[in-house]
Every structure is written in structure tokens, then in C-alpha cells.
Image (cartoon, rainbow, N blue to C red):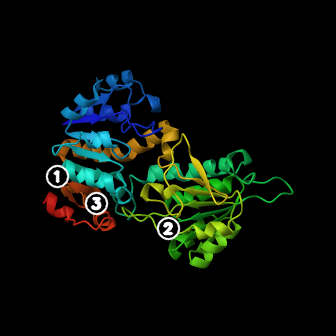
């Protein structure tokens, strides 16, 4: 199969969809792999590294896309990339379509087959290709939030662990999944007072047992959210509804009861954000202030630690990439019921129900496409 790895062009996105190690696996199976010149530089991988692994380096981006059957990316395609998509292309990347009406429409119009990392499942009900970046984002959220609490960044001037004689910061994490647990773990390790809110009692029981009560666990209700808004120095939004838009749990009105200089870190911003006042930001300008509350809403947080993120991502995606390359997308998805939910758009039709629901679109059963 002819496989292309373009250079990511989203603002301050330094990751690449495949490491040279992954490239060697594909080349070893006889696939033709083309990597755009400079695609791996942001993650510390040179063109020579890819050539040694058996890939061809392509300087012309139009040629790269034109010749490809399978296109591997990290972030959702930008408008100029959507314009390059053709019906014969299979795109494999993070899409997060439920928050992107124009992107969804563009992919529909392209006729391409578009498979999203974030909606592929596993036999435990998890999201295996979202998990490594969720781990990175959860851990980074605390670093970013701690920095945003500094006075020079508009924050209240609070040191997360405090000092002897001075209480630590209060951190609330909304959502106890992969992002939430990693954020809570980091905040706890830095010495903050940490609370996790979640609606799953079994999940709260797991977290309570795992951290032996060092992290407070609270069932998420409107009252619990109000209390978190009043008391917290930092709130991390880590809520995920697979493939769907995130619920707005902290409203504009609630900012009025928050402490001046407190911080909201919205890790759910890829899915529209779980704070009403959230809007996507970039690593170039990561924060803004609304009603005295600092908002950190960078939509590609793991891009800042591109080498770690690229390695973690390739470890997770490579088995699926190999299946697509060896079998073709139709057979690969037919053979693996957990791979099938990754199909979001095909031949001008939405094939993931939550995306269709977000925009009142018709959807088709993905199983009907691969059978």
C-alpha cells in the first residue's frame, strides 16, 4: 500500500504520526511509505532517520497527498488539507468532529474514508488510541495550570504545594477517566489538595482504593460543582463522552463565585470544552481571562512534548496502521469489531452516530459499509 505521513501544520503542532521505528515495520512488510520532508523534526526525528527505516522523503506536499492511498496524521486536517482529500483516500488521525461542523462537512464533501483514533475501542470499553495522549494531556494540565496560577500569568499568585505554614492549592478535577486520574496524580505529587468529581460510583471506588484516600472523591452533582467553583484554586475539565460534544459543567454565571485569579484548564476543548466560557487557544497564546478567571484551553496540549507524545502515539496506533496497510480499510474494520467504531465518515456519509447527532445529520451503520 502507498502510505503518506505529512508534516503537521496546525499551530505549534510538533508531533508526527509515525516514528522511524513504525516506518521500519511498514517498510519491512513491503509497503511504500512516503514521509514529507521535515515532518519528524519537531519530535526529534530527522529525514535521514526515516530513510534508514526504508521510507522515501517527499519534498512536495501535493505529490505526497496525490500519490497516497492511506494518509497518517496526528491532528484533524486543516482546510488546505481537507481540500486535498479525494474519495480514494483513507485518512487515519484524531478528528474530534463533534465540535467541528465545518470540518465534518468538508470531510463529507471529500468522499474520503475518515477513521478517527479517538473512537476506536477495546474489549474493556476503553479508548486505546486516545489513552496515551489523554495521559500526556492530564499530566500536562497540572503543569500548565500551576504556571497559570502565577501572578505574572494573571493568576492569584499561588504555589501549588504551598510552603510550611501555608496551605497548598485546592485542585478539583472533573472526570475520573484517564485524563482525570493522571491530572489528579500529578497534582497530588506536587503537593496540592486534590478532589475528583465523577458520576460513576464504581470509578470513584477504584480511585479511592488506589490512592488510599489521599485524593478526595466526590459524586458529581450541581451542588458539588458549585462547591468546587467556590473553593478551588484550579479546576481541570477532564470530561469525555466518546465522539460527542462535551457537556458545559462550569457556566459563565459560576465564574462570579470563583476566586479571583483562579484557573480553569479545559482538557476537553477538542470536543468543544466543558466550561461555557472555553474557546480553543494555542501554545502561542495559551490563556485568556474572563471575569478574573484564567482559562487555559490549548487544543493540542501534547504537541508541546512532541517526542514523548509521538512515541506514545505510535506505540498505540501501529497495530491498527499495520492492519489497514496489510488488509485495506474495509477488511481491517470488518475483522475487528473494536476498530469499526473508528469509522466516522465514508463516501459522503457520517458513520458515527454521536457526530451525526451533534449536527442533526443522517448517519449510516458502519457495519453496512464493511460487510
Disc 3 target residue: 341
| Secondary structure category for the residue under label 3 | helix
User: What residue is drawn where x is 29% and y is 46%?
Assistant: 92
Residue 346 position, x and y percent, is: 20, 54
Q: Who is closer to the viewer here, 50 or 287? A: 287
> Which image quarter is the N terminus in?
top left
* Count of numbered tags: 3
**Earlier-in-chain disc, 2 versus 1:** 2
Q: Who is closer to the viewer here, 338 or 241? A: 241
Disc 2 target residue: 248
Residues at marks 3 and 2 touching, judged by CB atoms closer than 8 Å? no
User: What residue is drawn where x is 59% and y is 51%?
Assistant: 288
Could you tell whether 236 is left or right of 26 in the image?
A: right
| Secondary structure category for the residue under label 1 | helix
Marks 3/2: CA–CA distance? 25 Å
- Mark 2, Cα crowd under 10 Å, few <14 / some 14-19 / many 20+, is some
Amino acid at each position: 500500500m502507498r502510505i503518506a505521513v505529512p508534516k503537521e501544520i496546525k499551530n505549534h503542532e510538533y508531533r508526527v504520526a509515525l516514528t522511524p521505528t513504525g516506518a521500519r515495520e511498514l517498510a519491512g512488510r513491503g509497503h511504500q511509505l512516503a514521509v514529507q520532508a521535515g515532518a519528524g523534526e519537531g519530535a526529534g526525528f530527522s529525514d535521514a532517520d526515516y530513510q534508514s527505516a526504508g521510507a522515501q522523503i517527499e519534498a512536495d506536499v501535493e505529490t505526497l497527498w496525490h500519490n497516497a492511498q492511506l494518509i497518517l496524521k496526528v491532528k484533524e486536517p486543516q482546510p488546505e488539507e481537507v481540500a486535498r482529500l479525494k474519495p480514494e483516500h483513507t485518512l487515519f488521525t484524531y478528528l474530534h468532529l463533534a465540535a467541528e461542523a465545518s470540518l465534518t462537512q468538508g470531510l463529507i464533501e471529500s468522499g474520503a474514508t475518515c477513521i478517527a483514533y479517538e473512537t476506536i475501542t477495546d474489549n474493556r470499553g476503553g479508548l486505546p488510541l486516545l489513552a496515551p495522549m489523554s495521559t500526556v494531556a492530564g499530566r500536562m494540565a497540572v503543569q500548565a495550570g500551576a504556571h497559570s496560577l502565577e501572578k505574572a500569568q494573571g493568576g492569584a499568585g499561588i504555589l501549588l504545594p504551598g510552603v510550611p505554614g501555608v496551605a497548598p492549592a485546592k485542585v478539583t478535577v472533573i472526570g475520573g477517566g484517564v485524563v482525570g486520574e493522571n491530572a489528579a496524580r500529578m497534582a497530588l505529587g506536587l503537593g496540592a489538595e486534590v478532589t475528583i468529581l465523577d458520576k460513576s460510583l464504581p470509578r470513584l471506588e477504584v480511585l479511592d482504593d488506589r490512592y488510599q484516600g489521599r485524593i478526595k472523591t466526590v459524586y458529581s452533582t450541581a451542588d458539588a460543582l458549585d462547591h468546587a467553583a467556590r473553593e478551588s484554586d484550579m479546576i481541570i475539565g477532564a470530561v469525555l463522552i466518546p465522539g460527542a460534544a462535551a457537556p458545559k459543567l462550569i457556566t459563565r454565571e459560576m465564574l462570579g463565585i470563583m476566586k479571583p485569579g483562579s484557573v480553569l484548564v479545559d482538557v476537553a476543548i477538542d470536543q468543544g470544552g466543558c466550561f461555557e466560557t472555553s474557546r480553543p487557544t494555542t501554545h502561542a497564546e495559551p490563556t485568556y481571562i474572563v471575569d478574573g478567571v484564567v482559562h487555559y484551553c490549548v487544543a493540542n496540549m501534547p504537541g508541546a512534548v512532541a517526542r514523548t507524545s509521538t512515541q506514545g502515539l505510535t506505540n498505540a496506533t501501529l497495530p491498527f496502521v499495520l492492519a489497514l496497510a496489510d488488509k485495506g480499510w474495509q477488511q481491517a474494520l470488518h475483522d475487528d469489531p473494536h476498530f469499526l467504531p473508528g469509522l466516522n465518515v465514508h463516501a459522503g456519509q457520517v458513520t458515527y452516530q454521536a457526530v451525526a447527532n451533534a449536527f442533526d445529520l443522517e448517519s449510516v451503520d458502519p457495519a453496512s459499509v464493511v460487510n
